[in-house]
Image (spheres, rainbow, N blue to C red):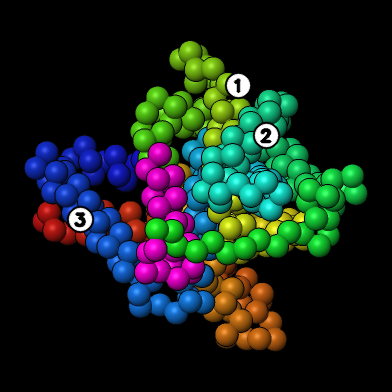
Amino acid sequence: MDSVETASATAAPTPWRALLADRRALLIAALIVLALLLPFAASSYRLFQFTLAYTYAVALLGLNLLTGYNGQISLGHGAFYAIGAYTAAILMHHWQVPYLLTLPAAALICGAAGFLFGLPALRLEGLYLALATFALGLAVPQLLKYRPIEHWTGGVQGIVLTKPGAPFGLPLDSDQWLYYVALAVLLVMFWAGHNLLRGRVGRALVAIRDHHIAAETMGINTALFKSLAFGVSALYTGVAGALGAVVVQFVAPDSFNIFVSISFLVGVVVGGLASISGALYGAFFIQFIPNVAEEISKAAPWAIYGIFLILCMYVMPSGLAGLIRIAAYRWRRLRAR
């Protein structure tokens, strides 16, 4: 919680805080209801875009746990996204594992991989850590093309998956069903992340980010919590990768190039560092703004995208979540006068 939120929470009387909490809960409930009704109003393509946005939001929350709340910069989370996607694809394609069961499998594998990667990364900080994760993001797509494992990964051709349909005879098409699956996973993962950050682990992660020497003085095992942050972050990203593989129905090494990792970092910064809701805002940005940029200029869409990024950083230096927090705080002060 930033200083603005802390000051307002301290100054506001208890009934006013309760009223604010009720309004926030009502707003969240209204947004969930709108999300539940969306499949019956949107086209299949638009529904596919929203489903991917929810998938990216899970990955961005994982990266935000690491970068926003713990202060470790990662430029290689596309690697964990690829590992999660290939875990789901291999289990579904070779062993006919139900797609929902591939999500916890990807969570376990990516969580373990992230924790193990976090151990040697303890010696690195700042740009050196970013460079190490950048190398990871470059290496994993190439390793997926390695000839001895082509039987499992499909090599450069990748793996084509079958789109699952709605179970139990539900009157939903495949796009609508996958949308609801992605929405359910999003809500569960955000709820788990919210509870994690409100507890002892979340306070320890923030303390390490703010001043790791002071955190050690207070008895926090910084090595353990920094590795744990990597593991949990990779777990979230792996779940997102597995879900993304099911939604897109295809995985290939070139689909997980370094641009995926950079896009995740862009989404976290634009959405708002150290903000749970910022992960959702950032996911919508990286999903929809490139399409908007292409509609504006088909000749130079990435130039338009770059202009959008510059404007976002100029207008919203703390991200969209920070802008909303500041606007809400100023509105409360005006109402209190």
Tag 3: amino acid: Leu
Residue 128 in view here: yes
**Number of other residues with Cα within 10 Å of mark 2, as a class: few under 14, some 14 to 19, many 20 or more:** some
Under circle 2, the secondary element is helix
Tag 2: amino acid: Ala
Tag 1: amino acid: Ala
Report the residue marked by disc 3: 26
Residue at x 70% of width, y 37% of height: 129
Magenta stretch, residue numbers: 169-192
In the rendered image, the vertical position of residue 66 relative to residue 255, given as above or below: above
Contact between labelled residues 1 and 3, with CB atoms less than 8 Å apart = no
Indicate the quadrant containing the C terminus: top left, top right, bottom left or bottom right.
bottom left
Residue 105 sits inside the magenta stretch: no
Between 107 and 270, the one nearer to me in the picture: 107
What predominant SS class does the magenta segment belong to? helix
Report the residue marked by disc 2: 113
Mark toward the start of the polypeptide (3 vs 1): 3
Q: CA distance from mark 3 to mark 2?
A: 39 Å
Indicate the quadrant containing the N terminus: top left, top right, bottom left or bottom right.
top left
Residue found farthest to the front: 169
Q: x, y (%) of residue 211?
A: 52, 27
Report the residue marked by disc 1: 223
Residue found farthest to the right: 147
Q: Which mark identifies residue 314? A: none
